[in-house]
Amino acid sequence: MKKCIGLLVLVSALTACVTINIYFPAAAAERVADQIIDDVWQLKDDQTPKESAPAEPASPAPETK
Amino acid sequence: MRKIITSFIILVTLFSAGWANSAPDLDINTPALNALKASMQGRHGQLSPHYNSGAIGLTNDGMIAVRDATAVPLKDRQSINGLVAAENADRAALYKEIANANKHPEWEGGIRDSFAGRWIDKAQSGWWYQGAGGWAKK
């Protein structure tokens, strides 16, 4: 049983390494592309309000901490 | 034998879990990236009439190119090549910088491909882009 757990830990550590090295986060890359393209081409009308608005929801968060 | 099968199943499960879960967001909040974004944003005002006229098109490798110089008003013909070159330099730097900022320089090509598809998807109708069979109008 102990051996089995040891093996499990080893295998999970190994796969974690392999996964990180060979994985290209295509979905994340697309999200980043969308974000940057929206900014550069100014496609989102709510971009400007969004930038000034965070002052409201963002400031209470640090205060509660 | 059983042990081997069990560990194989565990391995496969972990692998698939790894694929599914490891979709972290890419970091794009570096001074270099913000500067590139601002530079491209500033240039877009000059480029957009040329996208509209079809003088400039979006290439399938995430860049832009002059596709019909005759669509450019005479007074702008000198400047358009410089504009395109500057935009492409920024775009190349952008793809490289995103890869570097996330400590995976080898992702540059994948990032460029992702952008290439998204630029075209988000292009306004009437703009030109490079499809599988050459230039096409959206």
Image (cartoon, coloured by chain):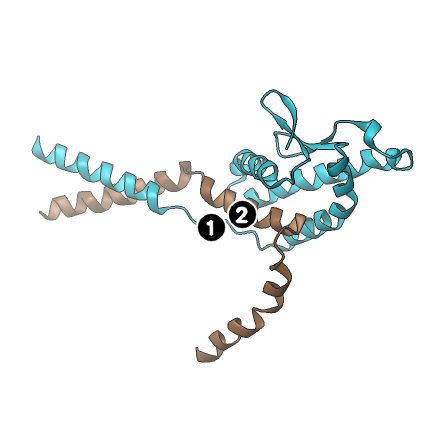
Chain colours: A brown, B cyan
- Identify residue type, mark 2: Val
For label 1, the crowd category at 10 Å Cα-Cα, with few meaning under 14, some 14 to 19 and many 20 or more, is few
Image position of A2 with respect to B64: above or below: below
| Position of residue A11 in the picture relative to residue A40 (left or right) | left
- Identify residue type, mark 1: Asp
Q: CA distance from mark 2 to mark 1?
A: 8 Å
Of B135 and A34, nearer the camera is B135
For label 2, the crowd category at 10 Å Cα-Cα, with few meaning under 14, some 14 to 19 and many 20 or more, is many
Q: Residue at x 60, y 60 (%)?
A: A46
Residue B87: x and y, percent?
A: 73, 40
Of B32 and B132, nearer the camera is B132
Disc 1: which residue: B25
Image position of A48 with respect to B50: above or below: below
Image position of B80 with respect to B134: above or below: below
Q: Chain of mark 2?
A: A
Residue A44: x and y, percent?
A: 61, 54
Mark 2, secondary structure of its residue: helix
| Position of residue A63 in the picture relative to residue A2 (left or right) | right
Query: Are circles 2 and 1 on residues that touch, CB within 8 Å?
Result: yes
| Position of residue B93 in the picture relative to residue A12 (left or right) | right
Of B34 and B64, nearer the camera is B64
Quadrant of the drawing holding the C terminus of chain B: top right
Quadrant of the drawing holding the N terminus of chain B: top left
Q: Chain of mark 1?
A: B
